[in-house]
């Protein structure tokens, strides 16, 4: 069933009207997907949304459209890109706060938390050793707090250092340490995930060894 035409509000169009200057209605038009390069029909309601709500310039519309198959992936990439920008801004703000109060353990941990949030969105080469050092400097201010070893565990886990992460999470959960309940629950959940990972890797190693032995015997 073809999409019904929709009236164009020329007052909302920007950067020249291009092919729509003499048109009264949006009608289905063929565009090339910017992701896969295949042609597809863009319905009137989608054209109106892009041009009048999102304010995409008419002349740039052909560079902003994705076919129905590629659109969900493109939206997810855009969402993560926007989250990455906000995470970068938050990290920069935390670093500025740390510079103003370099001996405050809370600002040290805030930098670590913001840095990890950014890395989870936008993987990049980084110095995990410096992040671990921050958590340990914070720990020196109050050995009874569980947050420093918790964040150290998060750093090690993201860096792929499972044993170090397990040790840090276990330290964070030691009796007598003070830590927000949400982080304590998360530390326990991460320990369980690490234990499951170890179990899976052990079974895989045992299976590989068995196959190798059988192959030699055969």
Image (cartoon, rainbow, N blue to C red):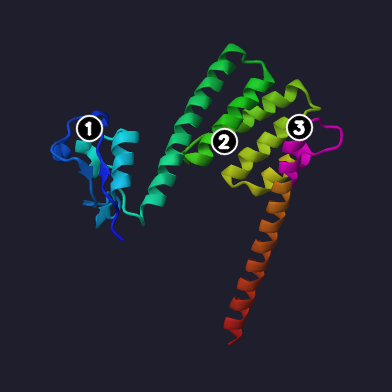
For the residues labelled 1 and 3, the Cα–Cα distance comes to: 55 Å
Q: Indicate whether 94 appears above or below 8.
A: above
Residue plotted at (64% across, 76% down):
210
Residue annotated with mark 2: 116
Considering every residue shown, the one lying at the far bottom of the view is: 218
| Mark sitting earlier along the chain (1/3) | 1
Residue 54 visible somewhere in the drawing: no
Q: CA distance from mark 2 to mark 1?
A: 46 Å
Can you give x and y, in whole percent of width and height, for residue 25 in the image? 22, 43
Please state the extent of the stretch shown in magenta in the rendering. Answer: 170-188
The residue identified by callout 3 is 180
Location of residue 193 in the rendering, given as x and y in whole percent from the top left corner: 68, 52
Q: Which mark is residue 42?
A: none
Q: Residue 145 is drawn in which quadrant? A: top right
Percent position (x, y) of residue 27? 23, 49
Q: Is residue 179 magenta?
A: yes
Please, what secondary structure does the residue beneath circle 2 have? Answer: helix
Q: Viewer-nearest of labels 2 and 1?
A: 1
Q: Quadrant of the N terminus?
A: bottom left
Q: In terms of sequence position, does the residue under pointer 2 or pointer 1 come before the other?
A: 1
Asked if labels 1 and 2 touch by Cβ distance under 8 angstroms, the answer is no
Q: Residue at x 63, y 29 (%)?
A: 133
Picture disc at residue 10: 1
């Amino acid at each position: 069933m073809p999409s019904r035409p929709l009236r164009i509000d020329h007052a909302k169009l920007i950067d020249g009207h291009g092919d729509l200057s003499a048109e009264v209605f949006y009608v289905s038009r063929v565009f090339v997907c910017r992701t896969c390069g295949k042609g597809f029909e863009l319905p009137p309601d989608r054209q109106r949304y892009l041009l009048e709500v999102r304010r995409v310039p008419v002349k740039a519309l052909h560079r902003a459209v994705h076919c129905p198959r590629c659109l969900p992936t493109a939206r997810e990439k855009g969402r993560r890109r926007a989250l990455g920008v906000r995470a970068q801004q938050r990290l920069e703000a935390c670093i500025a706060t740390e510079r103003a109060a370099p001996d405050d353990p809370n600002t040290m941990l805030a930098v670590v938390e913001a840095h990890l949030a950014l890395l989870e969105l936008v993987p990049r080469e980084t110095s995990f050793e410096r992040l671990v050092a921050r958590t340990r400097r914070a720990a020196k201010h109050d050995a009874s707090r569980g947050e420093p070893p918790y964040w150290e565990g998060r750093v090690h886990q993201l860096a792929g250092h499972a044993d170090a992460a397990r040790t840090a999470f276990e330290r964070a959960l030691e009796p007598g340490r003070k830590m927000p309940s949400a982080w304590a629950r998360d530390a326990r959940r991460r320990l369980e995930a690490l234990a499951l990972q170890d179990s899976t890797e052990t079974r895989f190693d045992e299976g590989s060894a068995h196959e190798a032995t059988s192959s030699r015997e055969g």
